[in-house]
């Protein structure tokens, strides 16, 4: 039996403490289960195989999309390779039939998402819902049931072993009263802010605050200095900027732990961030489709949460990629979420698998991911002062203003951005909205002098990987 979900009662009913307690013990139960499986319990592969059988059975019974897709499969005697891969575009095109709850309808979900005042609330008072940015060309809408959310939280919490926080960290937590800060895109129903708001509602006694990645850096520094978080999470590009401010003495916070996700964080960058803040960085690999896929070890490898997630590197023909070889794409299977099954889903990233036991001693599959490595743009003000803009801030501005999801912002000079679209609608209207929004954003960053022009042709793909970098630098500018 799967654990049942709980819905938060309306404020003022007096039941909020009870629901918070139930949320806590559900998450605690998942943490205990994960600890058991990783310390002497059944091998993760056996657990995953059992969960896959149950998930596929549920999908065949309750999802019209998967019922049709798996019509030719045997009842139970199937392997993972027997299951056809799926991609975002066809799933979104058949959204209602993809979901296993017949009450879920795309038109209702879109109406829910249109209200940004409901970020972090539950759709149908039951499901957590968010959307992906869609820079690969197709935006996605994803629902998560309460069981899946509890599993994601437990997977993160299970990493807090005896080595996660030392005596200095414990003192910092006490001094900051356990306050948590998240610097992300806050203006829409994205996974990071939605899941953060869910936690804030589930455990109101813990002080959590979100900060917008669109805020000018001086504003962000001032607000973080006032808040003084014990925990700080953000994208690698943001953490690098904050680390530079910390090293320069303008940012003055003492977090006990940093969390990094959403982009790739190189070893050198990680060391720079840890040196600036004098604390550990926990690197998480996840996506809108599955919030917690893998976590980084001290050797720089990502270890898959393989009792709850199956990750496959495949070539262009869909065949498994040998260890040590860069894959064409990554297929992910989320074993926790049953309302919107993600089974051999083409994630679009590229990976290299380690063929031997990792030197850190962790027996779980070890991978490295190539992807989400858009550039931080360094632009010059009229007074020749350098201002850094993070890629997720820039893409958020365009997506929210123009409703376009496949585009490229390229730095052509220190005071010049070129925008390219792969648009099929009213190109002039899309460009006008994007141009005006970018110009407004640049003015808030003291970059009113920066020109924004429309580039000829569609976005330029990486000649090596064939993938789209939404934010890139095309010329070296001093």
Image (spheres, grey):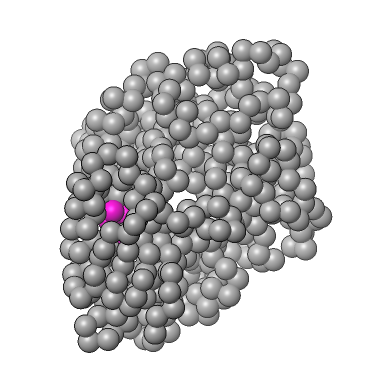
Q: Residue furthest right?
A: 356
* Residue at 75%, 33% in the rendered image: 46
Q: Is residue 452 above or below residue 365?
A: below
Residue 202 figure quarter: top left
Residue 51 location, x and y as percent? 65, 28
> Is 66 inside the magenta-drawn segment?
no
Quadrant in which the N terminus appears: top right
Image: magenta residue range: 394-398
The quadrant of the picture occupied by the C terminus is: bottom left
Residue 319 rendering spot, x and y as whole percentages: 72, 38
Q: Nearer the viewer, residue 471 or 192?
A: 471
Q: Is residue 40 left or right of residue 164?
A: right
Q: Is residue 35 above or below residue 42?
A: below
Residue 395 belongs to magenta span: yes
Residue reaching furthest front? 456
For the point 61% across and 44% down, which residue is it? 330
């Amino acid at each position: 039996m799967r654990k049942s979900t709980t819905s938060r009662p309306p404020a003022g009913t007096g039941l909020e403490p009870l629901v918070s307690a139930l949320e806590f013990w559900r998450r605690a139960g998942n943490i205990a289960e994960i600890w058991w499986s990783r310390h002497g319990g059944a091998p993760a592969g056996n657990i995953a195989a059992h969960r896959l059988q149950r998930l596929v059975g549920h999908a065949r019974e309750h999802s019209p999309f998967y019922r049709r897709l798996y019509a030719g499969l045997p009842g139970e005697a199937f392997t993972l390779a027997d299951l056809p891969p799926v991609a975002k575009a066809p799933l979104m095109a058949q959204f209602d039939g993809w979901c296993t709850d017949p009450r879920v309808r795309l038109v209702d979900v879109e109406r829910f998402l249109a209200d940004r005042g409901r970020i972090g609330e539950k759709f149908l008072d039951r499901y957590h819902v968010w959307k992906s940015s869609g820079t690969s060309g197709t935006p996605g809408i994803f629902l998560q049931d309460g069981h899946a959310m509890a599993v994601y939280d437990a997977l993160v919490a299970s990493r807090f072993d005896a080595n996660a926080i030392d005596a200095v960290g414990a003192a910092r937590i006490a001094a900051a009263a356990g306050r948590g800060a998240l610097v992300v895109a806050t203006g829409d129903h994205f996974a990071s802010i939605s899941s953060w708001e869910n936690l804030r509602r589930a455990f109101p006694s813990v002080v959590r605050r979100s900060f917008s990645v669109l805020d000018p850096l001086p504003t962000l520094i001032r607000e973080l200095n006032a808040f003084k978080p014990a925990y700080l999470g953000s994208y690698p590009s943001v953490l690098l900027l904050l680390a530079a401010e910390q090293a320069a003495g303008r940012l003055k916070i003492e977090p006990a732990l940093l969390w990094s996700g959403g982009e790739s964080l190189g070893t050198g960058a990680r060391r720079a961030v840890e040196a600036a803040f004098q604390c550990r960085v926990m690197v998480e690999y996840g996506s809108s489709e599955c919030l917690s896929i893998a976590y980084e070890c001290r050797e720089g490898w990502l270890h898959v949460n393989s009792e709850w997630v199956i990750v496959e590197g495949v070539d262009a023909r869909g065949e498994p990629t040998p260890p040590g070889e860069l894959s064409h794409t990554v297929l992910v299977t989320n074993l926790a979420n049953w309302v919107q099954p993600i089974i051999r889903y083409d994630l679009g990233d590229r990976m290299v698998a380690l063929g031997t036991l990792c030197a850190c001693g962790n027996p779980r599959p070890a991978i490295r991911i190539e992807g989400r490595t858009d550039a931080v743009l360094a632009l010059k003000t009229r007074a020749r002062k350098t201002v850094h803009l993070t890629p997720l801030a820039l893409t958020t501005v365009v997506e929210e203003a123009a409703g376009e999801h496949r585009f490229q912002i390229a730095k052509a000079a220190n005071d010049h951005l070129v925008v390219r679209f792969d648009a099929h609608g009213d190109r002039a209207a899309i460009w006008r909205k994007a141009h005006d929004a970018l110009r407004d954003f640049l003015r808030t960053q003291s970059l009113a002098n920066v020109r924004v022009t429309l580039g000829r042709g569609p976005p330029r793909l990486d000649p090596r990987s064939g993938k789209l970098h939404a934010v890139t630098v095309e010329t070296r500018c001093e």
